Amino acid sequence: MTLARGCLPLVILMAIAVVSCQTKDKAQQPRFTSDANGQITISANENSNRHFLEFRSRYALSYGHTYVVFGRTDKDGNMVDPQVAGLAPASTDPGAYVLGHFVPVSATTGATDGDLEEAYRSASWRVMLSDGEYEDAVRFIRKQQATSRLWDATVYNCNAFVADIARHMGYKAPSIWLRPQQFITKLREMNTG
C-alpha cells in the first residue's frame, strides 16, 4: 500500500501528459500583433523599426513546440535578424525526447529546426515593445538561456520556459500541459481580452 501511495504523484503526472497529447492541432492560426498592453494593432507601418517579441508555436512530428522569436521589424512589419529562444531536448535522437517524458534530459535553449519557417507556424502572438521593454525582456531571456539546462515534459517543458518569459513581461500564462498551439492561443486570449 505504501508503494502505491508513493507512485500516485508519478501516475497522475503521466496521466496528465498522456491526456494532453491526445488532442489534435487545428489548422494554422492567423497572426496576431498587439502592443505591450495587449491592444491589438493593425498597421504594419506603425510597427516599423520597432522591437518585438513573438510568442510562437509550430507543428512537429510530436505534439509541437513552443518558443519565442524576438528582434526588430522593417517598414512592412517583417522580422529583421530574428533571434529564437525555447527549451527542447539537446539531442536530435528521438530517444532523448521519449526519455524526457520520464526523467529530465539535457536541454538546448536556442533555435530548433523549423522555428522560423512559416509553413510550420501553428499559432503566434507578436507584441510590439519599446526599447526599454525589449531590453528588459531580452535580459530575462538570456538569463533563462544561461540557467535552463534540463527539459522534462511534465515538469519544465517548452511551455513552462515561455510561460516564465510571459510572466516576467507581466502577462498571465496558461497551464504548461496544453499542446503548444493551444498554449499560445490561450496565452494571447488571456492577455488581449
Image (spheres, grey):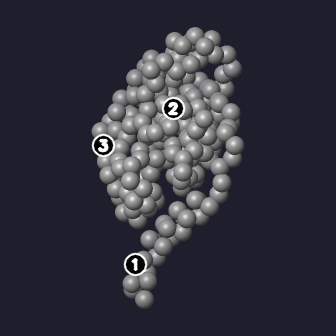
Q: Horizontal and vertical percent for residue 122?
A: 61, 40
Q: Quadrant of residue 23?
A: bottom right
Whether residue 139 is visible: yes
Callout 2: helix, strand or loop? loop
Question: Quick one: quadrant of the N terminus?
Answer: bottom left
- Pointer 2 or 1: first along the chain: 1
Q: What's the residue type where badge 3 is placed?
A: Thr
**How far is disc 3 from disc 1 in space, using C-alphas?**
30 Å
**How far is disc 2 from disc 1 in space, using C-alphas?**
43 Å
Decide if residue 49 is on the left or right side of residue 85: right
Q: Is residue 50 above or below residue 140?
A: above
Question: Quick one: quadrant of the C terminus?
Answer: top right
**How far is disc 2 from disc 3 in space, using C-alphas?**
24 Å
Measuring 52% from the left and 62% from the top, which residue is drawn there?
Answer: 17
Depth order, front residue of 75/162:
75
Measuring 42% from the left and 36% from the top, which residue is drawn there?
Answer: 111
Measuring 46% from the left and 76% from the top, which residue is drawn there?
Answer: 8
Q: What's the residue type where badge 2 is placed?
A: Leu
Q: What's the residue type where badge 1 is placed?
A: Gly
Decide if residue 38 is on the left or right side of residue 96: right
Decide if residue 193 is on the left or right side of residue 94: right
- Pointer 2 or 3: first along the chain: 2
Callout 1: helix, strand or loop? helix
- Pointer 3 or 1: first along the chain: 1
Q: Which mark is residue 50?
A: none
Decide if residue 117 is on the left or right side of residue 98: right
Residue linked to disc 1: 6
Residue linked to disc 2: 116
Residue linked to disc 3: 147
